[in-house]
Amino acid sequence: MSTHEVIRALSSCSRGTLKEQMAFCFDMFDLDGDGVLSAVEVESMLHNLKIFRQHQAQQDHLQNSKFQ
């Protein structure tokens, strides 16, 4: 899964309830499907969430720049 795909997926899940968002993130990063997030899977999730937040901040900045 590319970073762009992760960002799109996280963005689309942000419309759900917190419980749905958490389940989505868990399922997406439970790569081996064992029902437990390993340290490597958690590290991957946090890395991708950081990229998502950076992307969102860039988009917000660009959006705000258009109106100034």
Image (tube, rainbow, N blue to C red):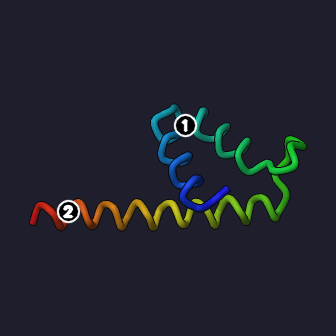
Q: Measured along the vertical axis of the image, is residue 44 above or below residue 36?
A: below
Where residue 65 appears, x then y in whole percent?
18, 67
Find the residue positioned furthest to the left: 68
Evaluate if marks 1 and 2 touch, with contact meaning CB atoms under 8 Å apart: no
Q: Residues within 10 Å of mark 1 (few under 14, many from 20)?
A: few
Which amino acid type is marked by label 2?
Answer: Asn
Q: Residues within 10 Å of mark 2 (few under 14, many from 20)?
A: few
Instruction: Give residue 7's mark.
Output: none
Q: Residue at x 73, y 41 (%)?
A: 27
Give the CA separation, mark 1 to mark 2: 27 Å
Q: Tag 1's secondary structure?
A: helix
Q: Tag 2's secondary structure?
A: helix
Looking at the image, residue 62 sits to the left or right of residue 51; the answer is left
Q: Nearer the viewer, mark 1 or mark 2?
A: 2
Q: Residue at x 56, y 46 (%)?
A: 9
Looking at the image, residue 51 sits to the left or right of residue 26; the answer is left
Instruction: Give residue 18's mark.
Output: 1
Of residue 5 and residue 26, the one placed in the foreground of this image is 5
Identify the image quadrant of the N terminus.
bottom right
Q: Residue at x 20, y 62 (%)?
A: 64
Circle 2 is placed at which residue position? 64
Looking at the image, residue 16 sits to the left or right of residue 43; the answer is left
Which amino acid type is marked by label 1?
Answer: Leu
Find the residue positioned furthest to the right: 34
Q: For residue 66, which quarter of the picture? A: bottom left
Looking at the image, residue 9 sits to the left or right of residue 26; the answer is left
Where residue 13 appears, x then y in whole percent?
53, 39
Where residue 14 appears, x then y in whole percent?
48, 41
Identify the image quadrant of the C terminus.
bottom left
